[in-house]
Image (cartoon, grey):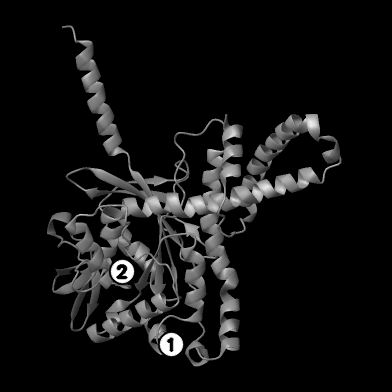
Amino acid sequence: MTVSSSSSRQRASRAGRANRRNLASQFNLMVAGHCFTGKSAYCQTLFDSLDVKQVVPDDPANPPSSILPPDNLSGPTPAPARIEFETDPNSGDRIALRLIDTPGIPIPANIHRDMGADDRSDAHVKSVVPHIASLVDFITQQFERTLLEESKVKRNPKSQDYQVHALLYFLDPQVCFACGGITPIDRYALDQLCARVNVIVCLGKADLLTVRHLGQLRNMVIEDLARFAIPVFAFPEDPDVEYDRAAIALNEELRAMLPFAIVNSEEAEPETVAVDDVDIIAPLPPQEREPRVLGRRYPWGVVEVENPEHCDFLQVKETLFITHAHELKLLTRELYYEQWRTDRLLEIRTSVLGSQSGGPGASQNGGAGAGGAENDDGFAYAQSMASMSRDSLMTGPRPGGMAQDIDGVERKMGQLRT
């Protein structure tokens, strides 16, 4: 039987569409915030709640014993594997999630008594500056990796997206209550982080709050964020985009829930089975097990993690991976990365031009030699950009301010790429 070329093309096209559907979209999530607010437990609970289809270790030849970041953290630590899961069983859409856990920010026990004393508040902030700098440096190092890949003559089509697309910042409800809102440490940390990443503010261990206390605390935090003009991700709406009513209503609903109340699941206990009227620890056959409910058991009942009436875990999960995943990734690329990239290219250009103008042959390259100087400058510029990017990946970049005019830099980059 002869198969027509058009039929072959149609089958190939269908196969290509199927392969594209099976490709997982990369999403990188960092968790940070106060000590003892359940950040690592959130990573575990989130993993337990996902419909995991595949785990892709960074080193397939040496798979890790755990696919989550380790418990003892000395700095921002990515998980040693990506977690692929389905967001919609009907469409088959998948996300490859990279979790990045971080050490908790130490909040002094007496900080609420020092809120009115500027000198003592400043001392508290200075004590955590290195900690916050390590978080910002990790985020900018991922930008460096992107810039280095973009600077290659031959790019790797399979290169991963390492940029941090969202950061969940966990607040301790008891600390916020004692301080009447966010602390000076939070103001500093959020100012630094919001310049580099989409920050979503959450309340850790929210099962310890009554409904009335939760409402009061939300008002305190939102008022402070507005008063200090801290640009956290608050479900903004682009004036140039026409939204449907459902999207507008969803954004309004989510804004009213900020900061999100998070409850994590406790560790699962071994199931028991009675033998000769004595309970012994033994696994039940799969067909006899009850579906596991993620939650925390108290004498008065169970707090269900994925019950919207109990906490906001499910809303945050859907925000990250379904309703706002594209927007978070777009903002990361077009706002935070482009701002950083502008600053970085200007920094490199200034460094190269400064070294060129001070060189021994600078005064001899005027007039007719201008073209040669331009070529030398372009070659040095390209070399410097590559070497500085590699150095930054080893030593950590220095975050800079936002630049306004990058036409000259962009023209130079265009010339070098061609």
- Against 2, residue 107 (above or below) is below
Contact, mark 1 vs mark 2 (Cβ under 8 Å): no
Question: In the drawing, does residue 110 fall left or right of residue 353?
Answer: left
Q: Quadrant of the C terminus?
A: top right
- Against 274, residue 52 (above or below) is above
Q: What amino acid is found at the position of numbered circle 2 in the picture?
A: Glu
Per the image, label 1 sits on a secondary structure element best described as helix
Decide which of 22, 13 is in the foreground and name it. 13
Per the image, label 2 sits on a secondary structure element best described as loop
How far across and how far down the image is residue 380, in percent? 71, 38
Q: Which mark is residue 179?
A: 1
Question: Where does label 2 land, which residue?
Answer: 267
Q: Is residue 240 visible?
A: yes
How far across and how far down the image is residue 230, in percent? 44, 71
Which mark lies nearer to you, 1 or 2?
1
How far across and how far down the image is residue 94, in percent? 28, 45
Decide which of 338, 278 is in the foreground and name it. 338
